[in-house]
Image (tube, helix red, strand yellow):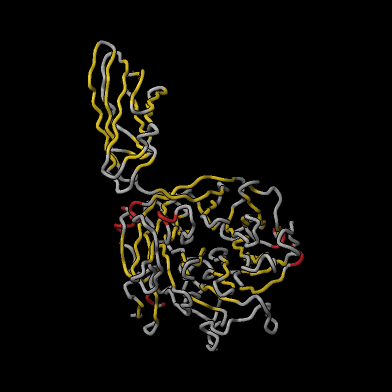
Amino acid sequence: MSLHRWAWRVSVAAAAAVLGLSTQFGAVANAASAAQVPLDDLEVTTTQVASGLDRPTAMVTPEDGSNRMLITEKPGTVRAYHADTGLSADPLLDISDRITSSGNEQGLLGIATASDFAQDPALYVAYTSAPDGTLTLSRFPMDSPSQSPVSAAGEEILLTQEHADYGNHNGGALAFGPEGYLYWSLGDGGGSGDPLDNGQDPSTLLGTIVRLDVSQTCGDNNYCVPPDNPFVSDPEARSEIWVYGLRNAWRFSFDSADDSLWIADVGQGSIEEVNHLAAGEAGTNFGWSCMEGSTVFDEERCASDADYTDPVFSYPHEDGACSVTGGYVYRGEEFTELADGTYVMTDYCNGAAWGVRAADDGTYTAARIGELPIQTTTFGVGPAGELYLANDLPGQLHRVEFEGPEPAAQCTVDYQVDSQWGTGFTASVTITNTSEEPVTGWSLEWSFTAGQQITNGWQAEVTQTGTMVTATNMSWNDTISPGGTQQFGFQGTLDGANPAPTEFTLNGSPCQ
């Protein structure tokens, strides 16, 4: 039987995947996480910001200060989105004349821009070329970062890989790594169960992620192979390969905080998986098609001397799950205290959202963190570092947001009816600050449920709109010290019952 690089890289238990339980397990690679909210308390949400996309597949934000995002559409166009002006009506680039998208997984699949885009603008794209589906990596130089449209006639083909036997498993993810090299994922050649036996064959680019230096040329190639690629000295392997043994790494991304690489690999019929490599970790064999996830798929394809690396997270095809769409590690500013260091991913079919975190001690924690729009095909990082996603046939662009648990109560309220007569009553309210910080400037709100009406108040400005009552401090009692109290009272009218309010909020936060 084959050797595994287990090192406690174990798949999440099926029960945990189904029930959405948080699971902690070990790993080889790790990444720092400053997130303050446990995954069990984190919930991901979205806000739709655009629609009308034609089967979006990938997105990138150029580093040129334009604050726009570029989104690829499967038929062969690139559209620009800006938060102020929305989705552009006309494409930035149109190469539909050279693309085959007849297969569901074919088309314009990936896009990337280099970090020096402002000085040397160019679009890098991955697509399946007509007529036979050849996997193609190309560059489209631009006259300036603001050029629109970009001329399709200026295409410079960098690298191709034949892919004529089957229309599926084309990979297509593109990203520039932290060292400036371009990474490109290619599927295993398609079919079911790796019929061409490419997964464990490093003499082909199929089933791999390649790493190229596209800033220069070498010989007849429009790229050079970086000298530290793991197979540069192996005559039986393609020197462009960075990692292999992948079935269809549809989406991968780098963590901007530690340069580690996250790879979401679409499974065969049972398991979806996520792999994580430390910065610079290369030559990794992820096991396909000997392995699917951490489970043996085809023992005849397993080699006794092979070193297979198991995923850091996986989930089964249950509850309608079918295909993983990998995302990014959140490193934005708006939700730092909730989600920093969380790798966000989803399933194309059922929309289940997962969060995975890598800790400094080498362990990983994963949990279901909600649901995202179905048919999510890609995630992206916007100009301000916030996450976005786009979905396939709905053709929508969504901004990804996060919510945490309700804040713990920092106050208590004692509500007392002091006197009551006929149609009138008086009441006193005591607020206690149970936090460790003073409250400076306070506003207490509650609702009456039986038609009570405030007529006047003392030691606070008490007003009422409909059923909602607001009591605001006076100038001389605007501070409630830690453990301290403030008291006020009011007079009101009633018509029958006079139930006490049951919920109070102080400056928008609930009190006990």
User: Residue at 72% of width from left, 60% of height from top?
Assistant: 97
In the rendering, at what x and y percent does residue 369 appear?
38, 52
In the rendering, at what x and y percent does residue 154 appear?
75, 67
Name the one closer to the observer, 202 or 450: 450
In the rendering, at what x and y percent does residue 445 appear?
36, 31
Is 263 placed above or below 490 here? Answer: below
Image quarter where the C terminus lies is: top left
The residue most toward the top is: 422
Name the one closer to the observer, 84 or 212: 84
Q: Is residue 249 visible?
A: no
Q: In this view, does 463 lie to the left or right of 512?
A: right
Image quarter where the N terminus lies is: bottom left
Q: In this view, does 14 lie to the left or right of 283?
A: left
Q: Can residue 160 be seen in this view?
A: yes
In the rendering, at what x and y percent does residue 506 appear?
35, 37
Q: Which of the 4 quarters of the picture holds residue 354?
A: bottom left
How many discs appear? 0
Name the one closer to the observer, 43 or 74: 43
The residue most toward the front is: 476
Is 467 placed above or below 20 here? Answer: above
User: Residue at 58% of width from left, 48% of height from top?
Assistant: 395
User: Residue at 59% of width from left, 45% of height from top?
Assistant: 51
User: Residue at 40% of width from left, 23% of height from top?
Assistant: 464
Name the one closer to the observer, 463 or 209: 463
Q: Which of the 4 quarters of the picture holds residue 25?
A: bottom left
